[in-house]
Amino acid sequence: MNATVDTVIEHDEPTGETAPPPRRRLRRALLATRTIVVVLILLAAAVAGGNHIVRQRIADRAMVDAGTAVLTAEPITVGSADAAVVTKVLATERTSVTAGTPLAAIALTADGDGPRTRELRAPAAGIVTEINVAPGQIARAGEPIVTLYDPAALAFRVDVPLEQLRRLRLGMTAYVSGPGLGGRIATTLQKVEPRVASSPAAQPDRLTVVLRPDPAALATVRTLVPGLQFAVVVDTTTAAAGTPAVNSA
């Protein structure tokens, strides 16, 4: 009798779960990676924003609002040592002149010699600000006939309370903004001067801080008219280490 041997092939029982195809697994991995990257970018932005706010607050505390400054110039006066009649004015206001440029002609009267004429010339290069005595008028001895100023010597002056001066040091950088500048310019705190009170009601607890424009700003500043007013803020982090306060003496 022939025996029949049945071959039984066993099959895995279905579990009810189907493994995702490779393409789906890759897509899920990319989505997860993108989510992580977005979260990291948001965290970095938050940290950067926080650091910026901190830096901004520190910078705000470092800036001192010094108030309103006035652009000033040291006047250069041209006149006669003796009384004279101004016969001719050879310059006009707001014009630049070089040293030696004729500014006016005058007539001096000497006893028995008749009138003598002479020219008044600019002692230095500058800009004419005012014709003080018109042609035909008499200029007294020592009276200015023409006034000019050196644009390279322009400075900003601001009256600062004594209490605020404790935070200031010579050499600090101050930023000036106002008409004709088109933006703020850098200046240097050069010195402090006693304040000359213009009236009995003027505040006595102030000193005048003198700010010199940086060389890069001189070309712009020399186009301005003395007497204009400007806003000033001082960066108190810019003084050299160990520099004493300007009112510590």
Image: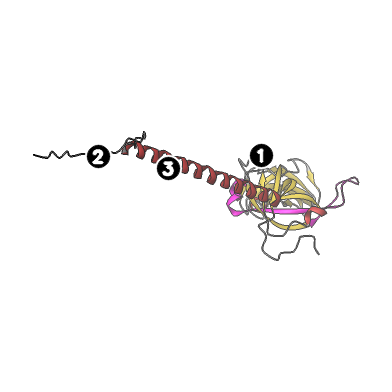
Query: Which residue is depicted at the point 71% across and 64% down?
Result: 243
Of the residues shown, which amino acid type is indicated by label 1?
Pro
Residue 215: give its label: none
Is residue 111 something one can see in this rendering?
no
Tag 1 residue? 179
Tell me the crowding category of disc 3: few under 14, some 14 to 19, or many 20 or more residues within 10 angstroms, Cα based: few
Mark seen at residue 10: 2
- Amino acid under disc 3: Thr
Q: Is residue 208 left or right of residue 216?
A: right
Residue 134 lies, in percent from the top left, at 74, 40
- Residue lying at 13% horizontally and 38% vertically, measured from the top left: 4
Position of 229 relative to 164 (above/below)? above
- The quadrant the N terminus occupies is top left
Q: Nearer the viewer, mark 1 or mark 3?
A: 3
Secondary structure under the numbered disc 1 in the rendered image:
loop
Mark 2–mark 3 Cα distance, whole angstroms, equals 41 Å
Q: Nearer the viewer, mark 2 or mark 3?
A: 2
Q: Which residues are magenta?
A: 193-220
Residue at the farthest right position:
200
Q: Position of residue 201 (x, y in %)?
A: 90, 45
**Which class describes the residues within 10 Å of circle 2: few (<14), some (14-19), or many (20+)?**
few
Residue picked out by circle 3? 33
- Mark 1 neighbour class, 10 Å CA radius: few under 14, some 14 to 19, many 20 or more: few
Disc number lying in front (2 or 1): 2
